Image (cartoon, grey):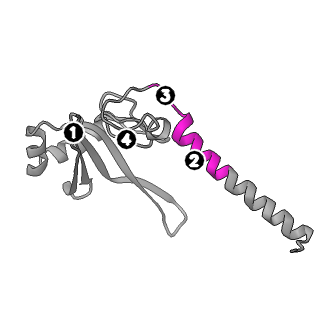
């Protein structure tokens, strides 16, 4: 028989409580946070709450915002002028133009904010780039990275999904 002193018992109990709390949090986030959205894309209904179905019918995390919705991004409010500037830069790229003519729609603008502490202690916060989210029905999703300082598109990532119902 193994003898465990009080100190080790307390540490084991604390570890078990921590693991239980983490598992409970995961279970609540995944299953209990049902916001009543219906989805018809084959994803299970457990993709609600933190992983709600997005405007393209894809699972998404975080807050809904931009272009007709709530314009906040966390605790930062995004102005219409900022969105228009980012969209203008994105639309000037020929690859983005091809996506738009192929049926993709701009659904969201997400700023990428950089915070820097200067030598004198001043804190400078600036949106140096942004991601423009595009959707095509429930079959495609694209992310367009826009560098605001250079005024160019630096990267485009396209995701597609095919559902065969029988």
Nearer to me, 102 or 123: 102
Which of pointers 2 and 4 lies earlier in the amino acid sequence? 2
Q: For the residue labelled by badge 2, is the local secondary structure a helix, a strand or a loop?
A: helix
Going from N to C along the chain, the mark reached first, 3 or 2, is 2
Does the magenta-highlighted stretch encompass residue 35? yes
Q: Please state if 22 lies on the left or on the right of 93 as rendered.
A: right
First in residue order: circle 3 vs circle 1: 3
Callout 4 secondary element: loop
Whole-number angstrom distance, CA of label 2 to CA of label 4: 16 Å
Per the rendered image, the range of residues in magenta is 21-36
Disc number placed over residue 26 in the picture, else none = 2
Which is closer to the viewer, label 1 or label 4? 1
Q: Residues within 10 Å of mark 1 (few under 14, many from 20)?
A: few
- What distance separates the C-alpha of mark 1 from that of mark 4? 18 Å
x, y (%) of residue 90? 18, 47
CB under 8 Å between callouts 1 and 4? no
Quarter containing the N terminus? bottom right
Q: Residues within 10 Å of mark 2 (few under 14, many from 20)?
A: few
Pointer 3 residue = 35
């Amino acid at each position: 028989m193994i003898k465990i002193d009080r100190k080790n018992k307390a540490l084991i109990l604390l570890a078990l409580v921590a693991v239980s709390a983490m598992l409970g949090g995961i279970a609540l986030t995944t299953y209990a946070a049902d916001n009543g959205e219906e989805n018809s894309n084959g994803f299970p209904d457990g993709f609600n709450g933190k992983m709600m179905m997005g405007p393209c019918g894809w699972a998404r995390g975080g807050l809904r915002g931009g272009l007709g919705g709530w314009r906040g991004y966390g605790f930062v409010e995004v102005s219409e002028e900022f969105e228009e500037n980012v969209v203008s830069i994105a639309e000037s790229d020929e690859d983005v133009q091809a996506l738009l003519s192929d049926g993709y729609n701009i659904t969201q603008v997400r700023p990428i904010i950089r915070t820097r502490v200067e030598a004198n202690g001043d804190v400078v916060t600036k949106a140096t780039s942004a991601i423009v989210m595009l959707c095509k029905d429930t079959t495609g999703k694209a992310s367009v990275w826009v560098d605001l300082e250079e005024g160019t598109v630096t990267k485009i990532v396209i995701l597609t999904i095919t559902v065969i119902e029988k």
